[in-house]
């Protein structure tokens, strides 16, 4: 249901009144009933209907030499584009529910001039509890009826013809909306005597067929079929052949721009179609531009969203890289700190072990020096021992001839001149190595008495 502003705009467009206050007062006087207000206003200014009718003989009306006035045609009023709003029956809408939401996107195509003429539901009886007892036409059934009509029309008439779409009315209406074209509707009555001649000479004429195919979406139906019958009731078809030009508006309504009832010549049909197309062209162009603007805005928003997402992803990537770099630096710093700590601990441990080792060696030297006792005075039972070290340093001491070679080793160890413990005492002439296996021999037994010269040989 349109709001107050739309009702005011529609009333101004139809009546031609520019004073919004006056239009508001008229609408308020009729309880904001747009149909009642327009009907009340137009009843005093418009005496004829806009439906094109012909009471003359079909053969005369099909004569291209006859004029519109001689054929009984009544021209449509020029001020308004849509002269009638038609409420579609729910049984037709249910065949393709896509238009209910799709038509809303069109907005008020016919806002430039609308005579609100709401038709009641056709073919919908009320069952128990207010529920509809009418059998709904499914999408497949509506499309099947349309394809059967197209096949029959192609079979019965020439190849030059309007390209009727093989789909239900609501789908055809949606197609016209998407292509920003008007919908040309033809309701076919096979039993009517004027139908064959009209189809052959008017509808299938090269000029009319080409004009319809180029500028309209064409939909046709047999009134004996379910959807064709319902549409003939909705459009108030009283004579056949019946043609109409409609466009979608909002909710469950279509705008009936023009209709032709009865026999009509190709020239009259072409003139009517050209006039409707010319009058509705600004609305179609506006709708197309609005749709293009919406598409551009949507594309711009998508591009902006894509740019925002790309920027956000780049920021997130940089933040992630910065965080990873920071974590790496922190990890390396922690590893370096841990390594330094381990090195310091190892250094402290080595220093402690070295100190402990040096202390142990000092105690050992002291113990061995004490075990040697005092150096004896010179005498026949005293052996003079000279010890040379690898550094060239010499040490000399007297021992009892009965002292063991182990005592000489203890003397060398007590001096602290060596950093190693694995060494041997060797004599030059003759060269004899006094290893650990000979340490129990006395100096005299080893042939080192009364004096001996030994040097330290590192193992």
Image: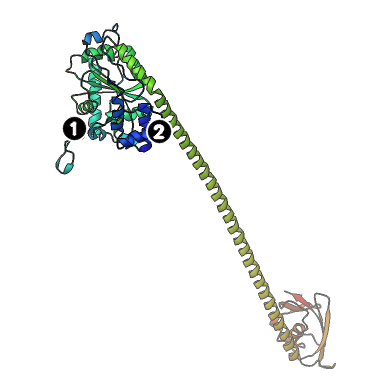
Who's the residue at 77% across and 88% down the image?
444
Q: Residue 286 placed where, x, y %?
A: 43, 28
Asked which quadrant contains residue 350, the reply is bottom right
Which residue is more in the foreground, 143 or 421?
A: 143
Q: Residue 27 placed where, x, y %?
A: 33, 35
State the mark number for residue 20.
Answer: 2
Q: Residue 169 placed where, x, y %?
A: 27, 28
Q: Report the side of 415 relative to 245 (left or right).
A: right
**Relative to 377, residue 427 above or below:** above
**Relative to 403, residue 249 above or below:** above
Q: Report the side of 459 relative to 261 (left or right).
A: right
State the SS at label 1: loop
Asked which quadrant contains residue 356, the reply is bottom right
Which residue is more in the foreground, 17 or 226?
A: 17
Count of numbered tags = 2
Q: Residue 132 placed where, x, y %?
A: 18, 39
Q: Which of marks 1 and 2 is in front?
A: 2
Q: Which image quarter holds the C terminus?
A: bottom right
Q: Is residue 182 visible?
A: yes
Q: Which image quarter holds the N terminus?
A: top left
**Relative to 144, residue 337 above or below:** below
Q: Can residue 107 be seen in this view?
A: no
Q: Which residue is disc 1 drawn over? A: 123
């Amino acid at each position: 249901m349109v709001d107050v502003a739309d009702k005011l705009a529609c009333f101004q467009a139809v009546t031609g009144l520019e004073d919004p206050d006056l239009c508001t007062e008229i609408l308020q006087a009729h309880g904001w009933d747009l149909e009642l207000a327009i009907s009340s206003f137009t009843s005093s200014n418009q005496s004829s209907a806009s439906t094109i009718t012909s009471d003359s003989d079909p053969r005369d009306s099909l004569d291209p030499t006859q004029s519109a006035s001689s054929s009984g045609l009544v021209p449509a009023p020029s001020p308004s584009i849509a002269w009638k709003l038609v409420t579609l029956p729910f049984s037709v809408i249910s065949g393709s529910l896509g238009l209910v939401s799709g038509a809303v996107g069109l907005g008020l195509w016919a806002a430039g001039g609308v005579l609100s003429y709401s038709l009641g539901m056709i073919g919908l009886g009320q069952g128990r509890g207010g529920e509809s007892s009418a059998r709904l036409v499914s999408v497949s059934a509506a499309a099947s009826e349309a394809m059967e009509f197209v096949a029959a029309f192609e079979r019965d008439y020439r190849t030059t013809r309007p390209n009727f779409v093989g789909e239900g009315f609501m789908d055809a209406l949606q197609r016209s909306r998407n292509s920003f074209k008007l919908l040309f509707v033809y309701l076919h009555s096979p039993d009517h005597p004027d139908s064959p001649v009209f189809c052959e000479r008017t509808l299938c004429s090269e000029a009319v067929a080409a004009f319809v195919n180029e500028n309209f979406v064409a939909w046709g139906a047999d009134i004996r079929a379910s959807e064709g019958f319902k549409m003939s009731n909705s459009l108030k078809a009283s004579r056949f052949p019946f043609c109409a030009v409609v466009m979608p508006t909002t909710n469950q309504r279509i705008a009936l721009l023009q209709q032709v009832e009865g026999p009509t010549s190709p020239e009259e049909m072409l003139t009517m179609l050209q006039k409707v197309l010319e009058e509705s062209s600004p609305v179609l162009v506006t709708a197309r531009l609005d749709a293009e603007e919406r598409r551009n805005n949507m594309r711009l928003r998508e591009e902006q969203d894509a740019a925002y997402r790309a920027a956000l992803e780049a920021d997130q990537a940089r933040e992630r890289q910065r965080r990873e770099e920071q974590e790496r630096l922190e990890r390396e710093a922690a590893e370096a700190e841990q390594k330094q700590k381990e090195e310091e601990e190892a250094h402290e441990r080595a220093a402690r072990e070295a100190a402990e080792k040096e202390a142990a060696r000092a105690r050992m030297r002291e113990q061995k020096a004490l075990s040697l006792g005092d150096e004896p005075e010179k005498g026949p039972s005293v052996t003079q021992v000279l010890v040379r070290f690898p550094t060239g340093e010499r040490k000399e001491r007297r021992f009892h001839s009965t002292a063991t070679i182990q005592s000489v080793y203890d003397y060398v160890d007590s001096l602290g001149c060596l950093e190693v413990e694995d060494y041997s005492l060797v004599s030059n002439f003759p060269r004899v190595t006094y290893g650990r296996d000979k340490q129990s021999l006395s100096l005299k037994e080893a042939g080192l008495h009364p004096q001996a010269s030994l040097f330290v040989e590192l193992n």
